Amino acid sequence: MRSIVLIADDFGLSPAVDAGILELVENGRLSGFGCLTQLPRWFDAAKTLDQMPIETSGVQVGLHLNLSQRFGGAWHRPLSLLISGAHAGLLPRDRIRESLRTQWDRFTQALGRAPDYVDGHQHVHQLPVVRECLLEILAQEAVHPWVRITSPIISPKPMIKGWMIAHLGAETLRQLALRHGLKTNGSFAGVYGFDQSQTGYAHLMGEWLRASPGDTVIMCHPGHFANASTDDPIAPARANELGFLRSVEFGDLLYAHDCRIATPAF
C-alpha cells in the first residue's frame, strides 16, 4: 500500500477554511496543514488547535509563508512582481528576511514549537532570495522541518500553471535544503485551475493517486462554503474540495488505488 501525503494549505485564512481543514483532520483525511500567520485572527485560530488531538494524531502542522498577498498590512508584492524581481535580483533582502522571521515568530509564539514543515503561499518560498532567507532562519533556529518542493509535478496532462510552479526554483531549493540537512518530498501533485466541480475534482484526484509514487505530496485547499470575494476568490473551489475529501467516494478511491493517507516519512 502506498503512503500518500495530503497537505491542506491556508489554515488561519478564515473561520470557514479553518473549520473545513479541522473537519478533515478529525476524520483522518489529512496528513497535515499549513498555517498563514500574518492575519490578525491568527492567534485565535491557533487556539482552536488546543481542542484537537494534533500532537497524538500524527497530523503535521506547517508554516505557510506568504509574500504575495496583503495579510494584516504586512509587506507583500503581487506574485508576478515577486517572480520577476527575484530572478532579476531586485527583491529587498532585508524586507524579505524580516517578513519571514515575523511569520516564523508568530507561529512559534502561538503553538509553542517549530513547524513540522515549511512551504509557501503561491509557492514563493522557492524563489531566489526568498529561499536563501528561509534557510538562514532555519539555520539560526537549528531546526529541521521538511521543505515542500513542487517538482516534479504529477499532472494528468501538461499544464502551463504546473510548469511555472515547478520552475520557480524548486530543484535549486531541493539541493540547497539537502545541503542544509533538510528533507524534502520527492514529487508534487494537486495543481489545477480551481475551476472544477466536485465531480471534476474527484476525477483529478483519481489521476493524481494513480500516478503518484509514495513520496508525493498532494496539495489541497479545502474549506466550508463562503461567498467568493477578493480576499478569497477560490472559495467555491474550497467547498468542492472539502465535499469530496470528506466523502465515502474518496475513501473508496484511496482503496481502489491501494493508497492510504499517512504522516510524512521524509
Image: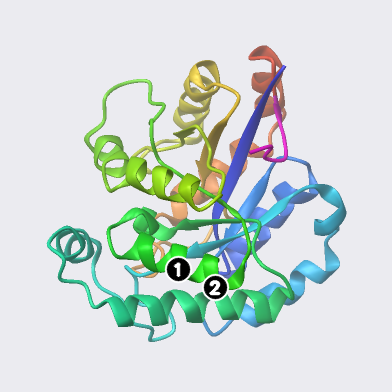
From the viewer's perspective, tell me whether residue 249 is left or right of residue 154: right
Where is 77 relative to 242, above or below?
A: below
Element type where label 2 sits in the image: helix
Q: How are the colours assigned in the image?
A: rainbow
> Can you see residue 13?
no
Tell me the kind of residue under disc 2: Gln
> What quarter of the picture does the N terminus occupy?
top right
Tell me residue 230's x, y (percent).
33, 68
Mark 1 residue crowding within 10 angstroms, few (<14) / some (14–19) / many (20+)? some
Which residues make up the magenta segment? 260-266
Verify whether residue 264 appears in magenta.
yes
Q: Residue at x 53, y 66 (%)?
A: 139
Count of numbered marks: 2
* Horizontal and vertical percent position of residue 45: 66, 74
Give the labeled residue for mark 1.
136
Quadrant for residue 241, please give it: top right
Check if mark 1's residue and mark 2's residue have beta carbons within 8 Å.
yes
- Identity of the amino acid at label 1? Glu
Q: Nearer the viewer, residue 6 or 248?
A: 6
Residue 264 vs residue 85: left or right? right
Q: Residue, x 62% and y 36% (percent of image)?
A: 5
The x, y position of residue 225, in whole percent, is: 55, 56
Q: Quadrant of the C terminus?
A: top right
Residue 131 location, quadrant: bottom left
Q: Which residue is mark 2?
A: 140
Residue 144 higher or lower than 155, as above or below: below
**Residue 56 shown in magenta:** no
Give coordinates of residue 208: x percent, y percent.
49, 24
Q: Is residue 27 above or below residue 134?
A: above
